[in-house]
Image (cartoon, helix red, strand yellow):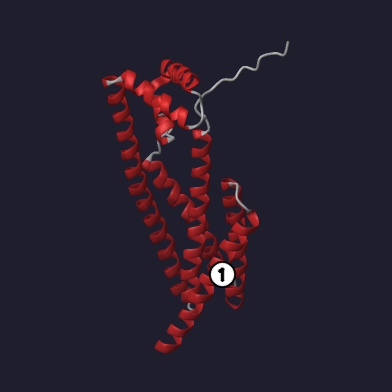
Amino acid sequence: MAEQEKTTYDVPSDTIDNGLLNKLRAAVLGANDGIVSTSSVVMGVAGATSDRTTIVTAGLAALVAGALSMAVGEYVSVSSQSDAEKAYIDREKRDLERDPEGELHVLQREYMKQGVAEATALQVAKELTVKDALRSHLRMHFNLDPDDLNSPMQAAIASLLSFTAGGLVPFLTIVLAPAKYRISVTIDAVLIALVITGYLSATAGKASRKRAVLRVVLGGLAAMIITYYVGVLFGTTIS
């Protein structure tokens, strides 16, 4: 007699992994923003003037302002998300306390929507409710893990550091390179950094690395070229 296959059901448990991937992707994109925005500023100023002090001042201002702006923006964004997640948790707790039987059948219906038979869905819902009712509902309805909520302060610090790390590439390059090769060396350094960030972001998101690299490189190159010639035009106009 053929051995009967035993099937077990559970809510997908990859929320934490996805959370880590999202954090990695956010860090890489923050670095990419730092590279592009800082390089655009220093290239634009370098197009307007060859004065090293002016370029350093503008680059440092762009680096600091950009990093702080990213940190504040991320703090506000994650705070709003965190408030919403806490509201979801509180609401599910109230629903489970007020009507546990009704919430059991809500969970059952969610599994039935995914094609699970009625009796099986009820059994799964009962087992998950006994195991951890709150976690089961949060994952099913919101793909939310109550033990892995984002911290606004951590997100802000991560954004500040990632933007700074990316922005230091064009800033240090244009400051330290000889005046004669300042533009070409900065472009080369930025393109290499963009290739790395594009590759890492695609790897984190399991997307096409070639498309991601091409996209960030072309975008960054276009930003540098446009701002450089805007600087050249502006410098010529006021001189």
Residue marked by disc 1: 221
**Vertical arrangement, residue 88 with respect to residue 136, above or below:** below
Write down the quadrant of residue 125 in the picture.
top left
- Residue found at the far top of this picture: 1
Task: Assign a secondary structure to mark 1.
Answer: helix
Q: Is residue 125 left or right of residue 212?
A: left
Q: Position of residue 173 (x, y in %)?
A: 56, 65
When the figure is inspected, residue 89 is found, relative to residue 133, above or below; the finding is below
User: Can I make out residue 125 in this image?
Assistant: yes
| Vertical order, 220 against 139 (above or below) | below
Q: Residue at x 59, y 20 (%)?
A: 7
Left or right: 24 in relation to 159 = right
Please state which of residues 16 and 100 is positioned toward the viewer in this rendering.
Answer: 100
Q: Locate residue 143: give its quadrant.
A: top left
- Residue at x 61%, y 48% (from the top left corner): 203
Tell me, yes or no, if residue 50 can be seen here.
Answer: no
Instruction: Please name the residue shown 40% across and 65% down the image.
Output: 61
Q: Is residue 233 above or below residue 108?
A: below
- Density class for disc 1 (Cα within 10 Å; few <14, some 14-19, many ≥20) is some
Of all residues, the one furthest to the right in this rendering is: 1
Q: Position of residue 16 (x, y in %)?
A: 50, 33
Which one is nearer the viewer's eye here, 47 or 84?
A: 84
Q: Amino acid at mark 1?
A: Leu
Q: Measured from the top left, where is residue 131 in percent x and y? A: 44, 17
